[in-house]
Amino acid sequence: MITREDAIGKAGRALLAHRLDALVASSPPNVRYTAGTSFHTQVSIPERLALVSIARDGEPCFIYCAIEEGHAKEESWLRNMRAYTEFADTPVLVLADALRQQGVASGRVGVEERHLSHRDYSALRAALPGAELVAADAIFDRMRAIKTPAEINVLGSAAFATDAAIRAAFAQARIGMTEREIGDVMLKEARARGGGALLFQVLCTGQNGFKIHAEPGDTRLDAGGVLRTDFGLVWSGYRSDIARTAFARPLKARQADTYRRLEEVHQMVIAAMKPGVRASAIFHICTQAFAQRDVEFTAPHIGHSIGIGGHEKPMLQPFDDSVLEPGMVFMLEPLIRVEDGLYHTEDMIEITEAGQRVLGRSADWSEPMVVG
Amino acid sequence: MITREDAIGKAGRALLAHRLDALVASSPPNVRYTAGTSFHTQVSIPERLALVSIARDGEPCFIYCAIEEGHAKEESWLRNMRAYTEFADTPVLVLADALRQQGVASGRVGVEERHLSHRDYSALRAALPGAELVAADAIFDRMRAIKTPAEINVLGSAAFATDAAIRAAFAQARIGMTEREIGDVMLKEARARGGGALLFQVLCTGQNGFKIHAEPGDTRLDAGGVLRTDFGLVWSGYRSDIARTAFARPLKARQADTYRRLEEVHQMVIAAMKPGVRASAIFHICTQAFAQRDVEFTAPHIGHSIGIGGHEKPMLQPFDDSVLEPGMVFMLEPLIRVEDGLYHTEDMIEITEAGQRVLGRSADWSEPMVVG
């Protein structure tokens, strides 16, 4: 996990590099990164903002709803705290006051323009007429893109445990079981390995296999069917996200052939992921490899970075020209559409000085797994 | 559940009443309300916007990421659909184009200023220089505040099943079990009653009882301890949200006394909830009743409306002067802080012509439940 020293140190260097007087985190992942904690209600009740204001000097200020006082005091590494009273106070006006106290009433303040609502942004701008609000989204993206060894440890263990839970659930899948039954086994296997809150569980077979985000339902696994999952949970504040595809016996030759082509392209793309290569180039290598093999590929990306957030930057997509660097951690997830559904596989790739390292593959997935 | 006729009908009347030429939904609950479906990724990947644009004439336009095509076509009741390609397209520019095609390039367009990010709002404004963007958040709040009988049915059943799952899990709780073990039983009981995705599960005992949103962990239930939960899941797109407090044997006289005072105030507030009374007045009735009984009460609200969203408007808080009307559905949830933790209870209250109706109380909670 990120430490206070690493996170606040990175923020301090970013302030200098971008000539900012303060940096304000508002999205749940950036609040967690800079405060050491975030609140579930930031997602379920978005108006109940939590904010971290980091100035050049002094302790960063953590602003949260008083309802979360116990949680904040126990879990945050920040010591300059301001609780606001919901409905009586306006969170961004409390932020404006904190910024004035931090001496940046007339400075350059970096905020998350991709996260702050238009209403909140407008209220903040009106409350700080002397300050210049600057988009800081990319600054936070960049801070979080290079993981520390401790973060890579947590992410790798989370990916491994998630992969192992999928493997274990697939091994228990039987023809005639419903998606929901297989999904419940998978969740239990993940919990037994220490998994926390469930983020998403795509799990489908039959016609549902054509829906990318199909949740487990009452459809039963048929002989010869495709079983696909995309499964993610929270592990010590970090995310897992693993997709796998298996086949109910008997495996058809055509399924095995398609699966092997997917795996072949996947391994080829992994080998291309090295420091100095652009994210967009990785995307193009993948699409060309599929085209050469006559495989239909239309996804807008083939992967994303991961950490506290689910889709972090850089993204492996055609318009992201970020250069891969050691310490970046990607989920590479080619997804193809064939006659009996979508085939999907997903692995965690750490970019290293020497090239790359696959993290979290708990078993050999190079050959199609046959279940039932 | 809301129907297309009800939702689009309400939107059409709102357009006329507020002299708008179009109304744009962007938050997940408002998209679900107007399109009949929403996407999990609207929450997990907020930049992957889904939007519904409703003009005075013609079919509303549903804009979503092409990745969700299968889901959208199968689940939405809208037929005018525009899929955008992630990264290649900018969702709000696709929206601007849809608005132009709907003939409102120069009209008054209601948008969600509490939801649209500053970046997206600014891009939309720049793309539609002739249009006037108007805050429509309160218009959507109002549309969703009065539930249809079908919505009340779903909500009542969801609350009942959630309450029954809590009661069943508490009945199986034993001294020495961990919070996580009790929580797992509760989740299983909810699933057996048809519960869908878990939204939140507060479940705590001992010192954790002072943290309002404590997730189940490894703390064990002690004799004489307090066991508190606040539990919500999705049921056919609608939410449940029930809080209860129980006591591990032996029940102390002081605990029973405090619990009965909580229940007494709760019942008194329920009786006060009638058409014509202001939400703020309900809040004050509750705080005064606690003050008269020397119970510490500091929460910023005592409840909220519920539906597709978790904290819908009106809220039972001191600054919300909305008048209660038949068809509104509230979660009334007084929460008090005493020497051994927080005591919390929560019930669903439907406002009717005659007064109110408690929905979803599956058992008699008027006396403290003793477990273990």
Image: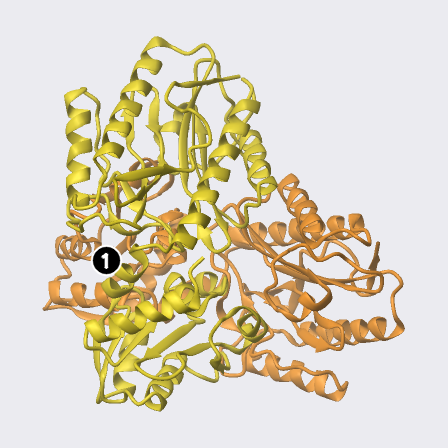
Chain colours: A yellow, B orange
Residue at image location 58% in from the left, 36% down from the top: A189
- Of A165 and A353, nearer the camera is A353
Give the letter of the chain under mark 1: B
Q: Position of residue A262 (x, y in %)?
A: 29, 24
Q: Position of residue A99 (x, y in %)?
A: 33, 85
Under mark 1, the amino acid is: Ala
In this rendering, position of residue A129 left or right of residue B262? left
Q: Secondary structure at mark 1?
A: strand
Quadrant in the rendering for residue A274: top left
In this rendering, position of residue A65 left or right of residue B116? right
Residue at image location 51% in from the left, 45% down from the top: B236
Eyeballing the image, is A236 above or below A304? below
In this rendering, position of residue B22 left or right of residue A309? left
Q: Position of residue B344 (x, y in %)?
A: 69, 68
Query: Residue beneath label 1, please?
Result: B55
Quadrant in the rendering for residue B263: bottom right
Q: Position of residue B57 (x, y in %)?
A: 22, 54
